Image (cartoon, coloured by chain):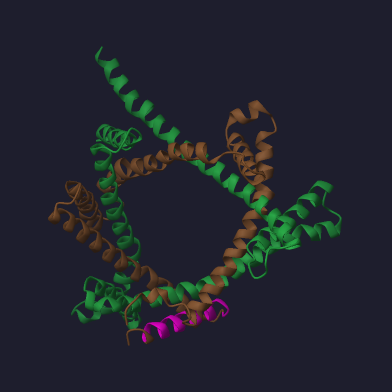
Amino acid sequence: MKRQVPLVLCFLFGVATILTRFSPHPYSQFFYEEVNSWVLIITPFALVLATVTLIRAHVTRIRRRTEYWQYSFIVFAGLITMVAIGVPFGPQYPAFEWLFNNIQVPMDATMFSLLAFFIASAAYRAFRARSFEATLLLVTAIIVMLGNVPVGDLIWSETSSMKQWILNNPNLSARRGIILGVSLGVISQSIRIILGIERSYLGGGD
Amino acid sequence: MEIFGIWLAAFLTLCIYSFLYRDNPFYRFAEYLFIGISVGYYIVIYIHQGFIPFAWEPFWAAVKPFWPGIPREAGWIGLIKLIPIALGLLFFGGLSPRHTWLIRYPSAVLVGFGSGISIPLMLRTFIFEQTRGTVEPFAAINAGTLSPWGILEAILMLIGVACTLTYFFFSVEHRGPVKWLSKVGIAFLMIGFGAAFGNTVMGRVALLIQRIDFLLNDWIGMIMDWLGSIF
């Protein structure tokens, strides 16, 4: 009951979904679209569970007065504000959009832009042309960076076309090799999951 | 309200950039607020774009006939939505250590569906299409429509793909010719990683420029306009 039924469910849904992709019959398509919508229904419950877990973790932090416990109230303030406005009135409600545009978007962009500084410092330490492979990586990165900005073409007029050639040829062939390898890995892993050989998603316990 | 929004966004932007000096209360404030706002945002999006249109509305249309005076709009098929709702509710078993195993049911459905969909998807989108893209230029070579430079590019592409795959092929020991093929594969991989690194850096720098542009033009520009109107 605790392990066998989920394995059977996984097998049935996996095999049925594969079959729907090879059958244009209306029943097959109905099944596919229905189960696809089930995924969209089940996912919010997982998100609610994740949110409950987050709230519990922060309540514990506040109760135990761990380091920086005061900031947990800020998490609650942000969460409650968004949910209190967004759930009853919808994401198109002006107040929700205002919060999204003036808090979430700027912070999201700033957090990611912060990485520019850390990438620069990491590159300074890591980018040393100590071997042929490291030199290739360094030279390619420099050409691609220069090819993305107007100053690259000012230094040498062919920089951007060289960047494009690198992206379209040696870069694409390496990416294709990686994509083919990853795809074969995903297929073999999916077959293992459907057949019940790979069971890590069931977690521990009996 | 627009002015307050610009001030708020500028304050939060500066709070996050203050981390470049060192960890401080302003950064922590912005960090924790970001977590709360993001989680709240995704809850709202999932509820309004997932749960309500795909679960609640069909389910409500199916159970409406139970309420007297309400005309029947949809068939009983809508009741099928009870299954994913019930499966979703099983996630709450995770809140009790004794009932954590209940999570396995919805997880099995999600994992089974995901695995089932990924096999034909990976075959069609990646394996067949990428292989076709690699060997297709050779049809043009055969037809005599490809330039000598195009022929060179097509051969280079095939060598790159084959050597990169050889590098990831661990079923044979990398000795002799396999070792050399794998070395060529590493060279192609390094070019790929270099290009990816270059693009990532430029993407992050573009974001940095956009934030500095916001601070200089939108925020400080607004302050300057305000000061100009006073003096």
Q: Is residue A80 visible?
A: yes
Q: Position of residue A152 (x, y in %)?
A: 62, 30
Q: Which image quadrant: the C terminus of chain A?
A: bottom left
Name the tint of chain B in the rendering.
green
Q: Name the side, left or right, on which B53 lies relative to B200.
A: left
Residue B26, position in %: x, y? Answer: 25, 37
Number of marks drawn: 0
Q: Is residue A114 above or below residue A72?
A: above
Q: Which stretch did the figure color magenta? A: A5-23
Determine if the magenta segment contains residue B105.
Answer: no
- Please determine whether, in this image, residue B8 is positioned above or below residue B39: above
Please tell me in which quadrant of the rendered image residue A7 appears: bottom left
Chain A visual colour: brown
Say which of A27 and A18 sits in front. Answer: A18
Residue in view at x 25 percent, y 46 percent: A95
Residue sitting nearer the eye, B26 or A36: B26
On screen, residue A105 versus residue A64, left or right, reads right
Q: Picture quarter containing residue B7?
A: top left
Does residue B71 appear left or right of residue B155 in this picture? Answer: left
Position of residue B32 measured from the top left corner of the image (x, y, whole percent): 26, 47
Residue B73 in view (yes/no): no
Magenta span includes A17:
yes
